[in-house]
Image (spheres, coloured by chain):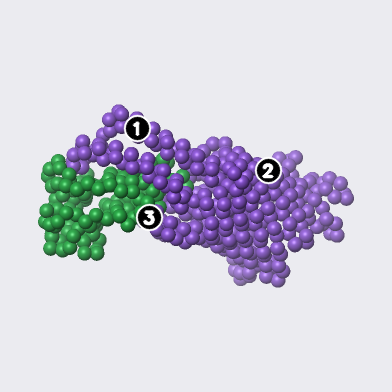
Chain colours: A purple, B green
Amino acid sequence: MKYLAVVFIASLVAFSNADGQLKIGEAGLEKDFAKNFQLNFAVPESPAFNLIEVGKSDILRPTSARELAVAVSDFTGSGDGFTIPQKFAVEFSPGLLIGGKELSLDEYQKKPWLYRLRISGATKRDDGGTGNAEMALGLRWTLVDESDLRTNTRFLGDITAITDTLTAIYVAAAKRRGPPIAGKKLTLTDGEIKTVKELNGQLKEKYEKIADEKWNARIFEVAVGTRFMAADAMGNDLVTEDLAFWSIYGHGFGNWGQLLLGPTFKLKEELDESTFSLPARFYVGSNTYKAFAEAQYSDDDSKYLLSSGGEAKLYEGVWMKFSVGAEQAEVGSDRQWNMVSKFELNIDVASLP
Amino acid sequence: MSIEKISYNRGGGPIVVEIKSGYAQPGSYGFLLWEANANQIVMEKKGNFINSDDDSYPLPAPNEANHERIAECIATVAILPDIKNYRIDMIVSQDGGELGRVLEEGESDGPTVMVDIFLQLESA
């Protein structure tokens, strides 16, 4: 599976006692413990996972296509001990997965929409395995992705100029070696080794620079997903519960900010009720450190969500995220605000050195 | 390790060698055609993977002169940050049909990887 470049992102969300849900209502402050550990899948978040996740925000974080991505969530059981993950999702790009090995750069550039199309599937089981199983399927299409390096002509030209120079060095070494027979290897001179290191260093700087410049590049995605509920824990007698349509547009400001707008339309309760929500999130910062503020309105009982937080890259492949917010919910005939805080540690195993 | 040998039809059409980079990774290559049993380069080409239309090279005629010549591809693949995989194929064809290929594939933490693949032609 290594050749599929699996991106496995695991994050640990720790709720301290003080960070449990606080209900602010006429009855005063009440404390309710949320789950102590929740493994949240932050980037990328597939449509199918969004449907089974009991999340507060409807926003689908847009991202460039990966061949295969896996998400797991909810590692705690009824006794607050670790157990088999209750939620599992996989998202893959059929184009990249099936044709990636021999996919040339210009073939990709001719039909980037094909390789950015992603299919996702997710399952959810109740704690103890006795509740109804849930399953979801999703389809996501990135129509515009200005952060996609494979369609950035200027960047590719800069990279290729460096690889041209590197190749010339290796070809010169091959000519010194003679025909490639009897185990003869290429040997570089000390000067060539130094030049190769410098050129690779320049390339690495270009990758870091483009990541800083393009983290908030313009992106537009549409997605559709459907959730099924089974009559039992074994997944029998599936019934369609929800059907959802997302769109998400990301617009960058300089290299310091990004606004995400993600109108969502859902058919719920066995497709009997419809809801519309409009989440908006604004990021400020850089690729490595950023803060965000989010607001969401849903016409499902006129709910509001407000939250803010931040994320930071601690180490190559290791990201920290935190947020604090409040969601309005109905309790009987009253409307109450629930405060929620979250701390996440995201680990992208494929990026780990 | 013995060298990969690929047979061709001396009476057929031109032998064509194509260089390809997979996983949509950019980079550059040099192609060398070594004379049989000699330290002499018969043909040398260079290119990159931005446009794959110009990465096919017909070998010098007549076909029988290519017997035991060695085709070598030395490529530098740029490993773009989001996909660590790379693959370089050198494909030999004749009369529209593939005769054989050598390839190298793997993963790299980048930023580049050097690939050196070669094969020997045999007249059938």
> Which sits in the foreground, A306 or B31?
B31
Identity of the amino acid at label 1? Thr
Quarter of the image for the N terminus of chain B: give it.
Answer: top left
Q: Position of residue B54 (x, y in %)?
A: 30, 55
Q: Is A103 placed above or below B79 here?
A: below
Q: Position of residue A187 (x, y in %)?
A: 26, 34
**What secondary structure is found at the residue carrying circle 3?**
loop
Q: Position of residue A220 (x, y in %)?
A: 57, 57
Q: Position of residue B113 (x, y in %)?
A: 36, 42
Residue A300 in view, yes or no:
yes
Q: How many marks?
A: 3
> Where is mark 3, residue-wise?
A104
Earlier in the chain: of badge 3 and badge 1, it is: 3
Image point (16%, 49%), residue name: B69
Residue A229 in view, yes or no:
no
> Which sits in the foreground, A107 or A334?
A107
Identity of the amino acid at label 2? Gly
Neighbourhood count class around disc 3 (C-alpha, 10 Å): few under 14, some 14–19, many 20 upward = many
Identify the chain of the residue marked 2, using the numbered disc in the image.
Answer: A
Q: Is A282 placed above or below A165 here?
A: below
C-alpha separation, residue under disc 2 versus residue under disc 1: 44 Å
> Where is mark 2, residue-wise?
A309
Q: Are marks 3 and 1 on the same chain?
A: yes
Identity of the amino acid at label 3? Ser
**Res A278 → quadrant:** bottom right
Image point (64%, 64%), residue name: A244
Q: Is residue A307 left or right of residue B121?
A: right
Neighbourhood count class around disc 2 (C-alpha, 10 Å): few under 14, some 14–19, many 20 upward = some
